[in-house]
Amino acid sequence: MLTLSVIISLLSLPAALFPAAHRPKRSLSLPLNPVLQTSLEDVELLYELLLAEIEISPDLKISVKDEELASLRKASNFHSICNNIIPKHIPDIRRLSANLANHPGILKKEDFERLALTLAYSAYRTALSEGHQKDIWTQALISLFHALRHDLMQSSGPGVSS
């Protein structure tokens, strides 16, 4: 049975920025809390994946058109993160932005990576949008950019002007 102090401590824990990363999905065989960048080679691969032609299906599934890149083992983590973890709807992105605004300290490596991927996704959606939808995606993009910039400035240490 949970005591009142345990319940209060659970309620005071900061919410996960990307809750889907911590929820196992029975239908998928993806690792809990997957991360792409564990080495310099992984960073270079992520850069290649982002430069490759990306396709977003009507059901918002992201895929890499380059079959050779898409067939790499690390590309499966990219697909898992992009399709199962990062937010793809404006309300979810706004919620992420609000959580980032209240997030103390610098982001964990995996949260920074997911924020960068969410920013890239939002830029792609902004480019494809028109009219009022473009304005909405632009605001989401700007908000994510500010959060990413803020984290980079914090991680640079004291004495860095913004």
Image (spheres, grey):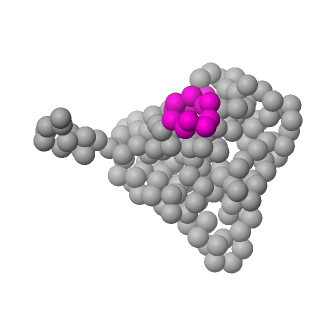
Residue 104 in the figure: left or right of residue 139? left
Relative image position of residue 35 (x, y in whole percent): 57, 30
Q: Is residue 34 inside the magenta stretch?
A: yes
Relative image position of residue 58 (x, y in whole percent): 74, 59
Task: Magenta stretch: give its range.
Answer: 24-37
Q: Is residue 90 inside the magenta stretch?
A: no
Relative to 112, residue 71 above or below: above
Relative to 100, residue 158 above or below: above
Measuring 71% from the left and 68% from the top, which residue is drawn there? 129
Residue farthest to the bottom? Answer: 131
Measuring 61% from the left and 65% from the top, which residue is drawn there? 137
Q: Characterize the magenta stretch by its predominant secondary structure.
A: loop
Considering the image in quadrants, where does the N terminus appear? Answer: top left
Residue 91 in the figure: left or right of residue 5? right
Residue farthest to the left? Answer: 4
Along the viewing direction, whichever of 81 and 118 lies nearer the viewer: 81
Q: Is residue 153 visible?
A: no
Residue 61 in the figure: left or right of residue 28? right
Relative image position of residue 64 (x, y in whole percent): 79, 42
